[in-house]
Image: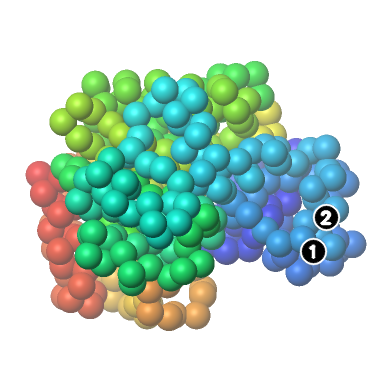
Amino acid sequence: MKPVCVLGNGQLGRMLRQAGEPLGIAVYPVGLDAEPEALPIQQSVITAEIERWPETALTRELALHSAFVNRDIFPLLADRLTQKQLLDRLGLATAPWQLLIAADRWPQVFAKLGELAIVKRRTGGYDGRGQWRLRADETDTLPADCYGECIVEQGINFSGEVSLVGARGHHGQTVFYPLTHNLHQDGILRTSVALPQPDSALQQQAEQMLGAIMQELNYVGVMAMECFVVPQGLLINELAPRVHNSGHWTQNGASISQFELHLRAILDLPLPQPVVSTPSAMVNLIGTAVNPQWLSEPLVHLHWYEKEVRAGRKVGHLNLNDPDGQRIAAALEALVPMLPPEYASGIAWAQAKLG
Ligand SMILES: Nc1ncnc2c1ncn2[C@@H]1O[C@H](COP(=O)(O)OP(=O)(O)O)[C@@H](O)[C@H]1O
Ligand SMILES: [Mg+2]
């Protein structure tokens, strides 16, 4: 099996490495300042766990590598302007939007998009950072450097958020997991729930959308699509050309995890439909120190990233899965007193989805 070099050495690279190990696939997550000489770059397939990167000795070398899978797709999707243009070109439903050109355009923006505007930096935002929710009387709170560098979207009054994680192989075949239900608070994913029998109309719509996107881009590997659920169906929120936080439940709740699926796809290994036969829940650990007591719950799989704990930072996650959703709900209940109080509402939301 060919080795894999991953641009970026955060938790996603770490979990790709973990997924490769039992298959005998050596995965090297590499920081951007790594020395190219220390890596088996020439023999490797190259992928990334981040969407954009600065020019360094390493990234310059990788950018020229013929086995850098999806290289030219990263910049297209890393810029929300070109990402939205792609969705429009394919005629896929997305939150109405426009480029935010200048402060004198605000009256026209609100006339077109309605009373709540969501401003997002074209590049570099994540976990709700680089994003502002504005009403017409609040626009002067926006930093001046946003104009030209942001898009503005209609604030969507959604009934829920879901994501679809899927993969496309070198020969164009696609596979998908069941939709994941996601709860975000302050722009950051707190809790996810996946059920083996998703709503079939939404699942079909989502697969058709993500399938069309991956096909158009000639994409290879795992891609994630975040959506809002509205009365008409799904609106695409954003795309990520990589493994995704909302797919972490697949580590313990699917026969093939999203990390293994990505490695299989980019290495041109068999890509059967992953089997999902039980409900799953995932609780993100955000700015919370590790607590060994979590392990007293037998359904809990702790995934700890060994990062320094800082407020607002993703430092791990808990996966729970069981054939009986009620047992997951009960285990989540037992976790509540072992977690800071801000976890309670996300856990109650997950219990309701499992109910
Ligand atoms: N147009 C919108 N209307 C309503 N809520 C939104 C909108 N855009 C984003 N949000 C909320 O903010 C969250 C983060 O926004 P997103 O565009 O996914 O950025 P990030 O890259 O930080 O994940 C979303 O999951 C959703 O909860
Ligand atoms: Mg998002």
Query: Could you tell me which residue is drawn at 46 percent across and 31 percent down?
Result: 87
Observer-nearest of 287 and 146: 146
Q: Position of residue 243 (x, y in %)?
A: 51, 46
Mark 1 CB lies closer than 8 A to ligand 1: no
The residue sitting at the front extreme is 104
Q: How far apart are the alpha carbons under marks 1 and 2? A: 6 Å
Query: Could you tell me which residue is drawn at 23 percent across and 59 percent down?
Result: 136
Left or right: residue 163 compared with residue 90: left
Q: Position of residue 103 (x, y in %)?
A: 40, 60
Residue 56, by quadrant, is: bottom right
Q: Which residue is mark 2?
A: 60
Left or right: residue 69 compared with residue 10: right
Q: Do we see residue 283 in this rendering?
A: no
Q: Position of residue 246 (x, y in %)?
A: 38, 48
Amino acid type for the residue under numbered disc 1: Thr
Query: Could you tell me which residue is drawn at 81 percent across and 60 percent down?
Result: 58
Q: Which residue is mark 1?
A: 56
